[in-house]
């Protein structure tokens, strides 16, 4: 028989086993898609800010210029300074106070740009379109970031006529050069009468990789411009530090899921292909008896699995790229970069790697088949090796189990290698599901502790003609008293406390310590405590992990806090969950004399009674305060962007791994069904009912699934704990014990059933086929 005849014969066999060919195609499709997405996530996690900064020609320095002190010619001359490699601008700029629906929206730095592109700071549109005329605005970030959609209308307060702006798009500046962009001609209309005429210049430098170099660049520009021209600066390193911190926090769980997906792909593909090859032993034995040579046997094997494998890989890489679009969009939001794409090498490496794995998985059995005699191949294709599984069958019969159940539970022992690979695949899938649930629960607790959106649904902040939320200001005592009176009068108020913010000095820490002091009981806000407790008496303070690391102090130690000219001795009683590399301190206002001033008063945190609507409550408070009061109540959305994106990614990645595991089970049960099709025909001829047949086939996978559940549960707990500690380490914080204790015994037991669900879902299709098959059909299919 010629080589072409061998290939044609093998292909004909493949066409007669359409279900097996479809399974090979589907498994390679899912595995290649998983591998493509895994490679894409690993690439996205590799210095995402640096890659986006280079792609978007990010600005090393944003310079705000007072146009009254610098002419256009003088600004143009800065382009030719020795260190400048590129520059954009000047763009007219102003700061506005925006409202939406009569409620404060916040302070926005607006720049006038006719185009999103330029030699410096190419903007990436995330939604909508660029400004095409007056009355339009493109906001920074995404709709979820800003809490509005395209088509929303913002009103500019403090400007004659209260001009309105329609949101037409959302864009990303890699270095956050502005909060929004309008047509250049709009800036004059939006600028308050008392505001200075400002312009924005964007620069790239040959040397700008350190803060020292950036300061030198600023000095060079300042010297080149008239005195008083430079009104403000913004460094790309600040944005880089923030983005790198987000990326580092995301890295552990992204890498964990990527590696799980890749390992699953390797296991399942190897199991599917080797099983498909072994399943053809009987046919190859027959063909060898009519003259097929060993080399032709190898060609026949490779050809039998090659066509569906190639089809699955090609479709899989396309599916992986399509699936990566929303995943990388969420990833880019978390990292604060404009856009991320699947790298070309990932689209090449995934299918090539899976095809190579397919060839290796098929080559071993093919070489063994080539060495077998015709009689040995036929025997190998009909039954497992002598003695395999017989002891298990005898034990099952002695236990008095129903015959279908006993046969099903003993069946895996006839193919121990296949059973082991299947058990590992199910264990991987169940581990991913349990891990995803635990990580989501842990991150939810971290989010609740970080943004307090559940305990502090409303905040009263300062909004004035030249102020934004969080700016320090000095409202009158009457205006402050109006806030407390309004909060007292509202029936929905359960708690409220004044929050003061500023920096203090602590010996041993070189930088000023960010300090939050509360004017009353703040224990209800719900800070996560890593160790120790929340302060409950004057002279006691809580600090974050960065404070302890930089000061060398520990819980129970006493230190001195310098508040202006006052020196206060305080005792550290607790370590608070506050992810940051900057030290932070929390105390009662009574502990820090001179700190609770109107200049430091930042906000009033408000807790509501159960059932109170936050939006209606905020509107009622604002109505009581009136339009003339700079204090305004807003519903507090918190700072949970990272947690929201992380939870979405976790769910999607877990689903992919679970689907791959289910296909692996389907393949195993299908191969076992094919191997034992003669036995199935005999069982049905002897009177086994469809329900009994279904139970028997499902029991084939029940034993390995139970063992997989036993392995998956502790593995998921350990993986969740290790991942959380890795994420906390990159965020420069410790971790409250409660964040990892998300698996009470009953919940863990129920989650472990994921292994049984995955196994049952994968076994259902071949089990149904076996239950419906007529005895004659089953015997003829052999």
Image (spheres, grey):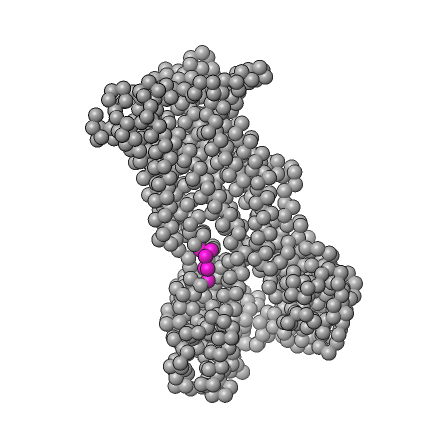
Quadrant of residue 72 in the image? bottom left
Residue sitting at 51 percent across and 21 percent down?
410
Residue sitting at 41 percent across and 74 percent down?
206
Magenta residues span 44-49
Q: Nearer the viewer, residue 763 or 154?
A: 763
Residue sitting at 48 percent across and 43 percent down?
260
Residue sitting at 48 percent across and 29 percent down?
419
The image shows a total of numbered marks equal to 0
Q: Nearer the viewer, residue 51 or 193?
A: 51
Query: Is 730 situated above or below 677?
Result: below
| Residue 274 in the image, given as x and y percentages of width and height | 39, 31
| Residue 741 in the image, given as x and y percentages of width and height | 65, 46
Can residue 212 be seen from the camera position used here? Answer: yes
| Residue 200 in the image, given as x and y percentages of width and height | 45, 77
Residue 135 lies within the magenta run: no
The quarter of the picture where the C terminus appears is top left
Can residue 652 be seen from the camera position used here? Answer: no
Quadrant of residue 92 in the image? bottom left
Q: Nearer the viewer, residue 609 or 406?
A: 406
Residue 45 lies within the magenta run: yes
The quarter of the picture where the N terminus appears is top left
| Residue 106 in the image, given as x and y percentages of width and height | 55, 69
Query: Is 378 situated above or below 20?
Result: above
Quadrant of residue 352 in the image? top left
Q: Nearer the viewer, residue 96 or 152?
A: 96
Query: Is 158 situated above or below 13?
Result: below
Q: Residue furthest front?
A: 371
Query: Is 43 situated above or below 463?
Result: above
Q: Is residue 192 left or right of residue 54?
A: right
Q: Is residue 378 left or right of residue 248?
A: left
């Amino acid at each position: 028989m010629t080589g072409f005849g061998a290939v044609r014969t093998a292909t004909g066999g493949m066409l007669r086993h359409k279900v097996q060919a479809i399974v090979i195609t589907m498994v390679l499709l899912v595995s290649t898609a998983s591998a493509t997405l895994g490679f894409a996530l690993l690439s996205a996690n590799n210095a995402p800010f640096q890659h986006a900064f280079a792609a978007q020609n990010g600005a090393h320095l944003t310079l705000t210029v007072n146009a009254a002190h610098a002419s256009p010619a003088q600004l143009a001359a800065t382009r030719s300074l020795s260190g400048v490699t590129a520059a954009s601008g000047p763009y007219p700029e102003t700061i506005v106070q925006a409202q939406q629906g009569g409620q404060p929206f916040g302070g926005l730095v607006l720049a006038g740009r006719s185009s999103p592109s330029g030699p410096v700071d190419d903007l990436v549109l995330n939604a909508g379109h660029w400004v095409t005329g007056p009355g339009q605005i493109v906001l920074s970030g995404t709709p979820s970031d800003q809490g509005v959609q395209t088509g929303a209308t913002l009103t500019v307060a403090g400007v004659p006529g209260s001009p309105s702006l329609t949101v037409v798009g959302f864009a990303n500046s890699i270095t956050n050069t502005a909060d929004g962009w309008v047509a250049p001609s709009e800036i004059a209309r939006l600028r308050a009468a008392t505001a200075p005429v400002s312009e924005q210049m964007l620069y790239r430098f040959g040397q700008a990789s350190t803060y020292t170099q950036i300061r030198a660049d600023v000095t060079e520009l300042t010297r080149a411009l008239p005195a008083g021209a430079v009104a403000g600066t913004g460094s790309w390193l600040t944005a880089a530090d923030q983005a790198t911190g987000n990326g580092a926090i995301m890295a552990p769980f992204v890498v964990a899921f990527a590696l799980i997906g890749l390992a699953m792909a390797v296991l399942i593909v190897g199991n599917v292909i080797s099983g498909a090859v072994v399943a053809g032993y009987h046919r190859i034995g027959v063909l060898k008896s009519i003259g097929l040579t060993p080399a032709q046997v190898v060609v026949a094997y490779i050809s039998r699995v090659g066509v569906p494998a190639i089809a699955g890989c090609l479709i899989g890489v396309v599916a992986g790229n399509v699936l990566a679009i929303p995943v990388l969009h969420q990833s880019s939001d978390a990292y604060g970069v404009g856009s991320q794409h699947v790298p070309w090498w990932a689209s090449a490496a995934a299918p090539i790697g899976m095809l190579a794995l397919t060839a290796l998985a098929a080559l071993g059995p093919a070489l063994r088949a080539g060495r077998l005699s015709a009689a040995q191949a036929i025997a190998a294709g009909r039954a497992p090796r002598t003695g395999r599984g017989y002891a298990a069958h005898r034990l099952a019969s002695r236990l008095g189990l129903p015959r279908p159940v006993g046969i099903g539970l003993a069946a895996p022992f006839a193919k121990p290698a296949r059973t082991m690979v299947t058990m590992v695949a199910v264990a991987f899938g169940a581990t991913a599901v349990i891990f995803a649930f635990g990580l989501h629960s842990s991150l939810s607790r971290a989010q609740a502790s970080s943004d307090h959106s559940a305990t502090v649904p409303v905040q009263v902040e300062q909004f004035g003609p030249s102020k934004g939320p969080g700016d320090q200001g000095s409202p009158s005592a009457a205006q402050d008293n109006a806030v407390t009176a309004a909060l007292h009068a509202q029936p929905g108020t359960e708690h409220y406390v004044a929050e003061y913010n500023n920096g203090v000095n602590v010996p041993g820490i070189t930088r000023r310590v960010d300090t939050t002091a509360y004017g009353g009981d703040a224990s209800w806000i719900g800070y996560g405590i890593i160790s120790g407790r929340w302060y409950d008496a004057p002279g006691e303070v809580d600090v974050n992990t960065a404070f302890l690391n930089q000061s060398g102090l520990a819980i129970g130690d006493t230190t001195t806090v310098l508040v202006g000219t006052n020196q206060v001795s305080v005792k550290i009683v607790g370590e608070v969950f506050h992810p940051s590399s900057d030290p932070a301190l929390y105390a009662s206002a009574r502990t820090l004399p001179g700190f609770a001033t109107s200049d430091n008063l930042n906000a009033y945190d408000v807790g509501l009674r159960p059932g109170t609507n936050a939006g209606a409550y905020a509107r009622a408070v604002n109505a009581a305060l009136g339009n003339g009061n700079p204090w305004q109540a807003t519903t507090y959305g918190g700072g949970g962007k990272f947690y929201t994106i992380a939870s979405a990614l976790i769910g999607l990645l877990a689903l992919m791994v679970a689907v791959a595991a289910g296909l692996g089970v389907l393949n195993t049960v299908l191969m076992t069904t094919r191997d034992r099709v003669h036995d199935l025909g005999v069982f049905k001829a002897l009177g086994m009912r469809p329900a009994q047949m279904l139970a028997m086939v499902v029991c084939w996978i029940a034993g390995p699934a139970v063992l997989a559940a036993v392995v998956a549960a502790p593995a998921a707990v350990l993986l969740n704990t290790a991942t959380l500690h890795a994420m906390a380490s990159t965020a420069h914080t410790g971790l409250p014990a409660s964040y990892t204790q998300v698996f009470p015994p009953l919940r863990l037991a129920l989650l472990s059933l994921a292994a049984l669900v995955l196994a049952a879902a994968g076994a259902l299709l071949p089990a149904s086929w076996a239950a419906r098959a007529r005895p004659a059909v089953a015997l003829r299919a052999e």
